[in-house]
Image: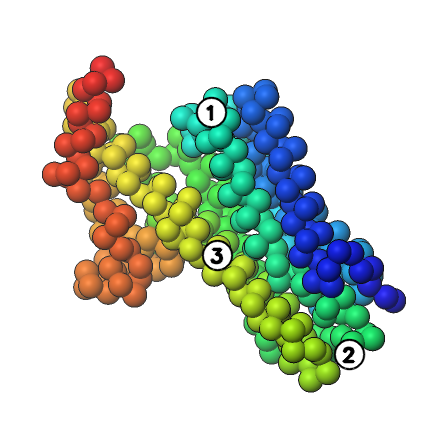
C-alpha cells in the first residue's frame, strides 16, 4: 500500500486548505442566516474530516494509524453532536451576541477556529502522511501496543470519559433545574472541578499525541519526519493554552462570578447569599484538575495559585470588578 502524495509529504497544505474551505463554508451560512447552530458543529466535525481524509489517502492502515484516527473521530463525533444538540435546545450561543452582525469580528472567530482545528489535528495528520507511513522511506511503524501506546489510550479514555460525563451532568442539572438558581453547579464531577470538560479535553489530546509519536523511535525514519512528529506536540500545548488563557477559563470564571455577585446584590432578597455560596465553592473546588473538596479546600492558597493553576487573573474583585458590574447593571435598568 502506497500513500497518496498530495501537495506536500506531510499533508500540511492539503489539510489546511480543506480546513479553510470547511470553516469558511460554515461562516458563510452562519453569517448569512445569523444562526449559531452550526458554529461549534463545524469545528468539531472538521476534526473528523481531517482524521478520516488523512487515513484514507494515506492508504497505510497500520494498527496505530487506525486507532489514533478512530480516537480522534470518536472525540469529534461526541463533541460536535453534543454542542449541536445543546445549541438547538438553547436557541443561541451568547458568545456571539456582540459579534454576530459584524462581519469582520465574526470572521475573526472563524479564522481562529481554522487555526485551532488544523493545529490540534497535526499529530494524526502527520502520522497518516507519506512522510511517516511510506514504506519506501523506512516508514514501518513500530509494533503497536508499546507502553507509550497503552498509556496514550488510557489517558485519552480518561479524558474522554471526564469530558463526556461532565457535559452530560451539567446539561442534566440545568435542564432539570436540579441546582437552585442561587447556587453553583456542585454535583458530580463539578463538585471536584470547576471546569472538568476542559481538563478532559486536555487529556484527550495528550493521549492522541503520545500514540502518534511512537514511529519517531524508528531508526530508519528520516530526521525531518521524526522532528515533525515530535513537533506536533503543539497540538496538546495549544489546547492547554486556549483553554487556560483564551476562550476557556478566562471567558468562564469572571462572568460566572459576576452573575452570582449581581444576583446577591439584586433586588430579590432570596438570593442574598448567592455570592457567599459561590465564594465557598471557589474555596473548596479546584479550578481544573478534579480533586475532592475535602483535600482541596484546606490546601494553602499559594499551592492553589501556582501548582493547581487558579491564577489571580481569574479572580473577580468585589471592589474593582464588582463596582463596574453594579454600575453596568444600573445603566441597563
3 or 1: mark nearer the eye? 1
Q: Is residue 41 above or below residue 299?
A: above
Disc 3 marks which residue?
238
Tell me the residue at 50%/50% (across/down): 163
Q: As drawn, which residue projects farthest toward the front?
A: 7
The numbered disc on residue 138 is: 2
Query: Residue 250 location in percent, x, y?
Result: 34, 45
- Do the residues bearing badges 2 and 3 touch, measured as CB atoms within 8 Å? no
User: Mark 3: which secondary structure?
Assistant: helix
- The local crowd at label 1, few if under 14, some if 14 to 19, many if 20 or more residues have their Cα within 10 Å, is few
**Badge 3: residue crowd in 10 Å (few <14, some 14–19, many ≥20):** some
Pick whichever of labels 2 and 3 is earlier in the sequence: 2
Q: How is the image coloured?
A: rainbow
Residue at (70%, 62%) from the top-left corner? 10
Q: Is residue 95 left or right of residue 330?
A: right
User: Considering only order in the chain, which callout, 1 or 3, is on the residue closer to the N terminus?
Assistant: 1
Q: Nearer the viewer, residue 113 or 199?
A: 113
In-front residue for pair 185/215: 215
Q: Which residue is label 1 attached to? A: 102
Amino acid at each position: 500500500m502506497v500513500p497518496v502524495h498530495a501537495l506536500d509529504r506531510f499533508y500540511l497544505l492539503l489539510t489546511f486548505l480543506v480546513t479553510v474551505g470547511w470553516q469558511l463554508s460554515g461562516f458563510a451560512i452562519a453569517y448569512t442566516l445569523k444562526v449559531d447552530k452550526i458554529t461549534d458543529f463545524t469545528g468539531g466535525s472538521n476534526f473528523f474530516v481531517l482524521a478520516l481524509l488523512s487515513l484514507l489517502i494515506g492508504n497505510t492502515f497500520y494498527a496505530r494509524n487506525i486507532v489514533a484516527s478512530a480516537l480522534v473521530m470518536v472525540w469529534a463525533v461526541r463533541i460536535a453532536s453534543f454542542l449541536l444538540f445543546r445549541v438547538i435546545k438553547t436557541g443561541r450561543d451568547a458568545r456571539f451576541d456582540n459579534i454576530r452582525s459584524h462581519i469582520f469580528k465574526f470572521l475573526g472567530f472563524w479564522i481562529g477556529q481554522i487555526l485551532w482545528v488544523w493545529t490540534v489535528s497535526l499529530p494524526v495528520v502527520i502520522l497518516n502522511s507519506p512522510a511517516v507511513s511510506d514504506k519506501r522511506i523506512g516508514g514501518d511503524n513500530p509494533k503497536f501496543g508499546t507502553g507509550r501506546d497503552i498509556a496514550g489510550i488510557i489517558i485519552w479514555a480518561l479524558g474522554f470519559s471526564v469530558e463526556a460525563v461532565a457535559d452530560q451532568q451539567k446539561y442534566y442539572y440545568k435542564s432539570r433545574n436540579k441546582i437552585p438558581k442561587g447556587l453553583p453547579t456542585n454535583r458530580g464531577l463539578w463538585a471536584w472541578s470547576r471546569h472538568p470538560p476542559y481538563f478532559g479535553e486536555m487529556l484527550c489530546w495528550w493521549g492522541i499525541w503520545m500514540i502518534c509519536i511512537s514511529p519517531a523511535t524508528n531508526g530508519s525514519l528520516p530526521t525531518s519526519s521524526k522532528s515533525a512528529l515530535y513537533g506536533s506536540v503543539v497540538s496538546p500545548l495549544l489546547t492547554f493554552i486556549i483553554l487556560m488563557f483564551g476562550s476557556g477559563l478566562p471567558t468562564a470564571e469572571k462572568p460566572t462570578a459576576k452573575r452570582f455577585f449581581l444576583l446577591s446584590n439584586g433586588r430579590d432578597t432570596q438570593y442574598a447569599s448567592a455570592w457567599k455560596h459561590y465564594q465557598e465553592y471557589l474555596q473548596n473546588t479546584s479550578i481544573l484538575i478534579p480533586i475532592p473538596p475535602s483535600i482541596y479546600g484546606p490546601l494553602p492558597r499559594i499551592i492553589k495559585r501556582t501548582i493547581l493553576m487558579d491564577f489571580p487573573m481569574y479572580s473577580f474583585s468585589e471592589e474593582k470588578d464588582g463596582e463596574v458590574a453594579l454600575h453596568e447593571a444600573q445603566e441597563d435598568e
